[in-house]
């Protein structure tokens, strides 16, 4: 089978608002990304994924789009976007952007017309969204159509006085869901996609892609996720886009689907699929929850790390796509905690555990995604005041925690451990005030540890996290590890993370202690002409079965 360009890509995800402020307004922007292209190129990146840059009221940091054809003034102008594309392409780098298909902002002209019967375009846009009349209870009192719960908490229904009915929003009430059963909606969104293709973008990450179809019988249920998530018909909408737009332009299309079965994953992103090229799944992302925690429940309940779950997830998805599709590799994104704080130890073993995590991921086959700041070991936020947080979800959940009986300190610790803001703090470029991100107070306060954890401190240090990422990304490109074959070992071991991968000239064996406790582990392959290639400790006894906390080693042998 012909190799597609994205199979050899190394992707870097930029959270635009927090990457680099170029005009001293405290907000990251497109020009800031353009100014850092050489840094990314030197790191080994050839594809940049940019979070939503569209005009938006910023109720959900840009995922609430007011105008799909304009750049948010926070981020620059359309000319700035064109300049970024031009300069990235001149360096042989590609740009992909988020595309939000499920919903718009409530300030989008379509919804402004849809909610107002007096608007001249009301009839045209009314059915661009999903409306339901009030549901009368047994006493004749009107109420919400169903008890479905939004992904952000609270009801999915908000009453619109002007039309005397409810509109559906499975996220924020300021993000009404589009009606993908309406052909006019599908055509309008195709026109939006075509606009950005014509500008020269190289692909899209499709946000919330498995929510496009709803159960139009609107059965009552709580929380009701099964009625607006992963319904079969949403595949039809995605495949329609693929056949008409994505495939003819050789774009990289990244989708996401939590809980997808093997069969569904291949329908999304198998080689025969018309929807996506890569599928982001989340099985490995929350392998440390505590189901007994009732004060800060769900993802907010931090518990022991289930290393076996992480390994089994990686092994499963490698097996699912081997020969039938292409795997995507990542530790975390804009919705999860910083990985060195989440699965490593950012207090006692910051450097060592960050390198361990890099060894465990970046020799695996597939296309990797590095999240901004991961390459220098950026950590979770250190905020002590609720007002320092910015994510809309934080304030809803804080109230829920207090209602559950948590005290302020417990609630704040949950937010520091698990909130999405952890992944959105300003990029730490230097020890300067505001971390070199901005000349003024940023939209979100920089982590205080930027004085030690930053690009400038690591740029010329051969043992730094940054330099290790550079060497690993160079290795995977030189050895074509993205096309390799992987074999996992000791999947049920509580600490050991072990795999062997075939490269162009060598086989590589990764043996890591994925824990903060010492480990003893013997691997038979070490007796078969493997030599120690790299380690995250300075003094290592090559064949030793003893591993210090978070110790990781890479062995290699010449291919026969």
Image: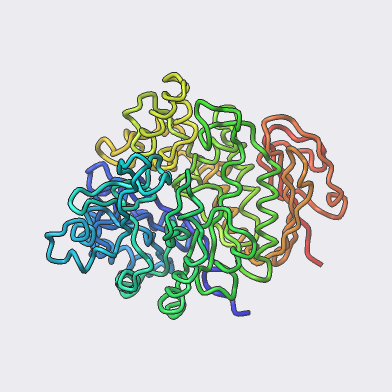
The vertical placement of 143 against 484, above or below, is: above
Q: In the rendered view, how is the structure colored?
A: rainbow
Q: Quadrant of residue 39?
A: bottom left
**Residue in view at x 42 percent, y 29 percent:** 400
**Residue in view at x 53 percent, y 68 percent:** 277
Of 41 and 223, the residue lying toward us: 223
Q: Quadrant of residue 342?
A: top right
The quarter of the rendered structure image containing the C terminus is bottom right
**Residue in view at x 72 percent, y 63 percent:** 485
The vertical placement of 56 against 496, above or below, is: below
Q: Is residue 210 left or right of residue 19?
A: right
How many numbered markers are drawn?
0
The quarter of the rendered structure image containing the N terminus is bottom right
* Residue 206 seen in the current view: no
Q: Position of residue 462 (x, y in %)?
A: 56, 44
Of 202 and 83, the residue lying toward us: 202
Q: Is residue 68 left or right of residue 304?
A: left
* Residue 15 seen in the current view: yes
Task: Specify the farthest residue to the front.
Answer: 139
Q: Is residue 542 left or right of residue 343?
A: right
Q: Is residue 542 left or right of residue 420?
A: right
Q: Quadrant of residue 142?
A: top left
Q: Position of residue 162 (x, y in %)?
A: 17, 52
Q: Position of residue 89 (x, y in %)?
A: 38, 69
Of 66 and 47, the residue lying toward us: 66
Q: Position of residue 109 (x, y in %)?
A: 20, 60
């Amino acid at each position: 089978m012909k190799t597609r360009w994205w199979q050899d890509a190394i992707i870097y995800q930029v959270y635009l608002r927090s990457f680099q402020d170029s005009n001293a307004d405290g907000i990251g922007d497109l020009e800031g990304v353009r100014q850092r292209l050489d840094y990314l190129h030197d790191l080994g990146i050839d594809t940049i994924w940019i979070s939503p840059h569209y005009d938006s009221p910023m109720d959900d940091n840009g995922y609430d789009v007011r105008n799909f054809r304009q750049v948010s003034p926070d981020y620059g102008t359309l000319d700035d976007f064109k300049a970024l594309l031009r300069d990235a392409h001149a360096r042989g780098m590609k740009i992909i952007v988020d595309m939000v298909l499920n919903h718009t902002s409530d300030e989008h002209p379509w919804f402004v017309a849809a909610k107002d019967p007096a608007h001249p375009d009301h009839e045209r846009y009314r059915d661009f969204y999903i409306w339901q009349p009030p549901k009368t209870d047994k006493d004749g009192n009107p109420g919400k159509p169903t008890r479905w719960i939004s992904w952000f908490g609270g009801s999915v229904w908000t009453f619109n006085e002007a039309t005397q009915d409810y509109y559906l929003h499975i996220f924020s009430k300021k993000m009404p869901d589009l009606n993908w059963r309406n052909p006019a909606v599908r055509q309008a969104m195709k026109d939006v996609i075509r606009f950005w293709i014509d500008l020269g973008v190289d692909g899209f990450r499709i946000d919330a892609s498995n929510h496009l179809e709803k159960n139009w019988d609107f059965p009552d249920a709580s929380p009701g996720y099964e009625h607006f998530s992963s319904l079969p018909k949403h595949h039809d909408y995605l495949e329609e886009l693929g056949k008409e737009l994505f495939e003819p332009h050789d774009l990289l299309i990244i989708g996401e689907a939590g809980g997808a079965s093997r069969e569904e994953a291949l329908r999304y992103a198998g080689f025969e699929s018309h929807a996506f090229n890569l599928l982001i799944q989340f099985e490995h992302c929350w392998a440390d929850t505590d189901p007994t925690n009732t004060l800060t429940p769900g993802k907010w309940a931090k518990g022991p790390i289930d290393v076996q779950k992480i390994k089994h997830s990686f092994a499963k998805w490698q097996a699912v796509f081997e020969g039938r599709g292409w795997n995507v590799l990542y530790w975390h994104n804009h919705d999860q905690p910083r990985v060195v704080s989440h699965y490593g130890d950012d207090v006692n073993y910051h450097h060592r555990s960050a390198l361990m995590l890099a060894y465990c991921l970046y020799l695996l086959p597939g296309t990797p995604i590095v999240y901004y700041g991961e390459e220098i070991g950026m950590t979770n936020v250190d905020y002590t005041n609720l007002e320092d947080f910015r994510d809309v979800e934080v304030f809803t959940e804080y109230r829920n925690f207090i209602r559950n009986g948590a005290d302020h300190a417990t609630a704040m610790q949950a937010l520091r451990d698990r909130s999405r803001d952890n992944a959105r703090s300003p990029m730490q470029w230097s020890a300067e005030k505001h971390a070199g991100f901005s000349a003024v107070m940023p939209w979100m306060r920089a982590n205080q540890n930027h004085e030690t954890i930053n690009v400038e401190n690591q740029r010329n240090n051969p043992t730094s996290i940054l330099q290790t990422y550079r060497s690993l990304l160079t290795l995977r490109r030189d050895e074509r590890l993205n096309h390799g074959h992987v074999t996992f070992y000791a999947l049920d071991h509580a600490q050991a993370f072990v795999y062997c991968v075939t490269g162009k000239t060598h086989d590589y064996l990764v043996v890591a202690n994925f824990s903060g406790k010492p480990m003893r582990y013997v691997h038979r392959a070490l007796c078969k002409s493997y030599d120690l290639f790299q380690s995250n400790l300075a003094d290592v006894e090559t064949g030793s079965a003893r591993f210090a906390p978070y110790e990781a080693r890479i062995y290699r042998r010449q291919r026969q």
